[in-house]
Image: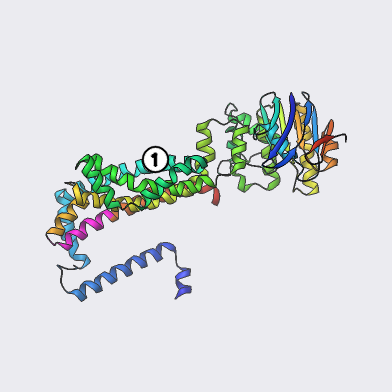
Amino acid sequence: MIEVRITGKRFGDRHVLGPVRFDVAAGETVALLGPSGIGKSTLLRIVAGIDADFDGFVSHADPLAIVFQEPTLLPWRSALDNLCIPHPALCRSAGIAALDKVGLEGRGDAFPGQLSLGQQRRLALARAFAGNPAVLVMDEPFVSLDAALTAQMLALTEALIAEARPATLFVTHARPEAERLADRILELHGTPAELVAP
Amino acid sequence: MTQAAAGMAPAKVTALSLLSLLGLWVVAAALSADPQVLPQPWQLVPPFARELASGTLPYHLGATLMRVIWAFTLAMGIGLALGLAMGRSERLNRWLDPWLVIFLNLPALVLIVLCYLWIGLNETAAILAVTLNKIPNVATVIREGARALSPDLDAMAHVYRLSPAARLRHVVLPQLAPFVAGAARSGVAVIWKIVLVVEFLGRSNGVGFQIHLYFQLFDVAMVLVYALSFIAVMLAVEWLLLQPWERRVRRWRTA
């Protein structure tokens, strides 16, 4: 489902990633741990196809969905439009059902700026799952949330992953989050970063 | 006084400001004491009514308005595309930036004269001259907006494979809206002034042509009638089209 065969990634003279090879099977959830600035998000952006400037190759099944560190919503479009624009095949009622599923009942007409940060993150999750993704990548999706909200979001994400069963790769620096959600944990270490046994 | 003004409704302040300008005009006209130099505001009413009733004023206003609409649409469309492309591609910007600087610094009058000389004294030359004068300003403003586009939203649009049309409509243009509004507002203000010069120099109708005619007859009242009538038309465009559009695209900010 996800096949990563990276031989190297540089930003100018800086060698960020060394050889990184791993697979994520269908329905499997893999967490990527590592200290801040090690290159976790860079690796995720390569997997998502956002950064194509690297040595090696990456392949994955389609469709792919992403949850960014920040909600990354269209602030000038309603919550429902934020689901329907990336997924044009999604009809209005399916969009409303997707909002209901993440606890945003009746907020379809609200603009993202009218939602709390927690609600915005729920909307970003709804957007990711609305297209029934075969592959899901998440970049520290619970960062900057308080403990209670993190627990709620973890439970919601866990339920959504259990239902859709995508091949999931997620980046975090919090081991408890990784242990709770992931079937397998990978760790990046060193300069340039390489995978080490956890 | 400042506190009183701060407490007033915006519409009241606007009305009071316009009345002050009118008062200044009345005083200046009284001081000049010569209607040939500066008539009183009320002395413009009879010639205005006469021009309106004869259909001459609407005819010339219409001719100018059509030129403004054509030049505005072309300049905004081409300037938007050019600015967006230059803001997104550093290589294209390096190639086209010197052109932009040259056209920004080329006097409007030179472009108008050259267009008339090369194309002839016709409608195409008139509209092209105005359009070429405005494109560099629009492109410069939009280029700044394009440089500030969010890379995160770009990444989102890329991952979710938004079509180019959807990307433009839902991701790019809403981010550019403040820049488009700024370019449109200054565009309307500048374009109609250049259109008047174009008409003054080489057209046989329009407000600029009429102003040229009454300039030769030293008829200040008629010059003011035509100038003020077109200012009224442009204010109507601002209040009835531009401002409602701007409110609509900004409603997510105030919701």
User: In the picture shown, does residue A166 fall above or below A149?
Assistant: above
Q: Position of residue A155 (x, y in %)?
A: 79, 37
Residues rendered magenta in the picture: B217-230
In front here: B86 or A77? Answer: B86
Q: Residue at x 27, y 49 (%)?
A: B195
How packed mark 1 is, by other alpha carbons closer than 10 Å (few <14, some 14-19, many 20 or more), is: some
Label 1 sits on residue: B78
Q: Position of residue B32 (x, y in %)?
A: 19, 74
Whether residue A73 can be seen here = no
Mainly helix, strand or loop, the magenta region? helix
Q: Amino acid at mark 1?
A: Ile
Locate residue A180 relative to residue A51 in the image: left or right. Answer: right
Q: Residue reaching furthest left?
A: B217
Q: Residue reaching furthest right?
A: A198
Q: Could you say which quadrant of the image residue A90 lies in?
A: top right
Q: Chain of mark 1?
A: B
Q: Position of residue B125 (x, y in %)?
A: 25, 42
- Element on which disc 1 rests: helix
Q: Residue at x 25, y 55 (%)?
A: B229
Q: Position of residue A85 (x, y in %)?
A: 57, 33
Whether residue A185 can be seen here = yes
Q: Could you say which quadrant of the image residue B16 lies in?
A: bottom left
